[in-house]
Image (cartoon, rainbow, N blue to C red):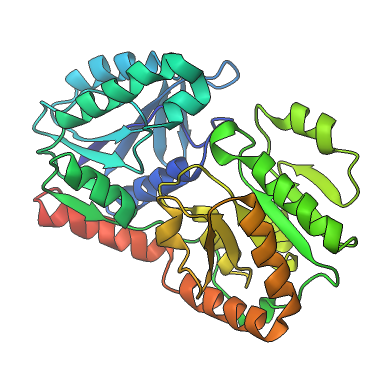
Amino acid sequence: MKKILILNRRCIRHPERGGAEIYTYELAKALIEHGAAVDWFCARPKYLKRVEKIDGIKFIRRGNAFTTHFYGFFYALQKRDCLIIDEFNGLGFLTFFMKNSILLIHQLYDHFWTVEFGPIGYPFRVVERMILSFYRKKPTITVSVSTHEDLKRLGFKDVTIIHNGLDLIPSNDTLKKEENLTLIFLGRLKKTKNPEEAIKAFLLVHRSIPNAKLWIIGDGPLTKRLEKRYGKDKGIHFFGFVSDQEKYELLRRAHFLLVPSLTEGWGQVVIQANAVGTPAIGFEVKGLQDSIKNGQTGFLVKDYKEMSLKAMALWKDQDQYVAICKKALNWSNHFSWEKTKEEFIRFTANRGIR
């Protein structure tokens, strides 16, 4: 039986899990379906067990978001008989010298470091690129053209794009919307996701369209501040964390998904919204330039002011809006977890990894 070791600082039950962890989880399940034994090494939030098995995946948890990289490195040294998937999220697990490892990276953190940590983040930007340079000869998987180009500029040679999948089958029955203009933000409420820019865009819309609404789905370090500042504003509703069923129902009923992220590896929420007939208006940044086909399935804008203007213009032009919704729905049909898993298994097989 083939043995696989995944190194990712977060697990599928981590409170800050995101699209990267969902992606990794689907790859892990694909490996199990093909007869592999899969271990996933990650950090340990206090309320989670040190060792736990979920859907056949063995989770081994040690350390925090930073120290788990060192624990994982020493754990990997003992696994010379495994295929090691080293997932690079700002920092990797330093397996670049091991012949049995491959790299998985969704995006470069780059200016994320300074957004999250201020001036002390600058050294981490340098360290990230320095560490990545050691991985240049590794077979590498990424999820978008944007990150592929970033890696090529750093000297990577063997990079394969395997897009995110989708846990919903797109349906043409989804184009029934709220009566009043409804905008939606979906994501972790933290600086890099820029949720306040979505709120600013909505407030401009609200001046011209008083019955417009903004739904905010997600939780995070900015939750209390945003709720305190905007929770009483008419038309803004904070849902917090919701189930997948609730998420898709709210996305279906909304007219536009607002994505003001500073950068994305891909933009999983864009495709999720598209799958229920909701186009996205996102900032013109890496990742979103790949998931949003500008002017066809949604729109890329420079700032929250342009975001608000685009939403209002499309709201007034219902023929164009319906056309964009249909194109967004058709675009989402290109993605599924089955397709993603097939491409991943093909990737491993083509490199003699079975």
Report the side of 4 relative to 268 (left or right).
left
Q: Residue at x 13, y 39 (%)?
A: 138
55 sits to left or right of 174: left
**Residue most extreme to the bottom:** 319
In front here: 68 or 187? 187
What is the number of callouts on the image?
A: 0
Image quadrant of residue 72? top left
In the image, residue 174 above or below residue 266: below
Residue 187 quadrant: top right
Residue drawn at (68%, 29%), measured in percent from left and top? 222
Vertical side of 5 occupied by 117: above or below: above
Q: Where is residue 216 shown, x and y percent of the image?
A: 73, 47
Tell me if I can see residue 55 in this picture: no
Residue 7 at x, y percent in the picture: 32, 30
The answer to whether residue 79 is left or right of residue 312 is: left
Q: What residue is at 13 percent from the left and 37 percent from the top? A: 136
Quadrant where the N terminus sits is: top left
> What's the residue at 30%, 56% (across, down)?
145
Q: Which is more toward the observer, 145 or 74?
A: 145
73 and 145: which one is in front?
145
Instruction: Name which quarter of the figure residue 83 lies in.
Output: top left
Residue 231: percent from left, percent from top = 86, 38
- Find residue 165 and report its horizontal and vertical position in percent: 43, 60
